[in-house]
Image (cartoon, helix red, strand yellow):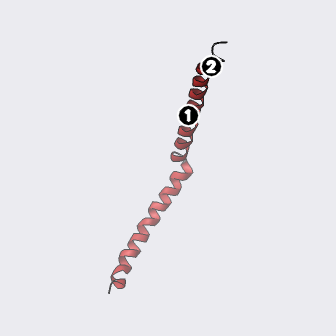
Amino acid sequence: MFLTSGKVFVILRNYLILALFVMFISWGLTDVFTNPNRLKQQQYLDHYGRYFNAGLVNILPRLLR
């Protein structure tokens, strides 16, 4: 009866909501950053970036003349 009435219940309810929210957000962020598909896509972008930089360095002298 004491836990279901008054300020104690509100504090426990809010704490539980906050704890669940933080747990799900951290789980979701961990899944996003360690997802194998994302890591593979990042590798493709990194490799493509090297070719893009090489092309930019190659054409830059012609653009600056």
Whole-number angstrom distance, CA of label 1 to CA of label 2 = 26 Å
User: Residue at point 54% right, 52% down?
Assistant: 38
Q: Residues within 10 Å of mark 1 (few under 14, many from 20)?
A: few
Q: Residues within 10 Å of mark 2 (few under 14, many from 20)?
A: few
Q: What SS does tag 1 mark?
A: helix
| Residue 20 point in image, percent of width and height | 59, 32
Placement of 25 over or under 52, stated as above or below: above
On the image, numbered disc 2 is attached to which residue? 6
Placement of 45 over or under 13, stated as above or below: below
Q: Is residue 4 left or right of residue 18?
A: right
Q: What SS does tag 2 mark?
A: loop
Which part of the image, by quadrant, shows the N terminus? top right
Give residue 18's quadrant in the image: top right
User: Residue at point 61% right, 26% down?
Assistant: 13
| Residue 57 point in image, percent of width and height | 35, 75
On the image, numbered disc 1 is attached to which residue? 23
Q: Is residue 64 left or right of residue 14?
A: left
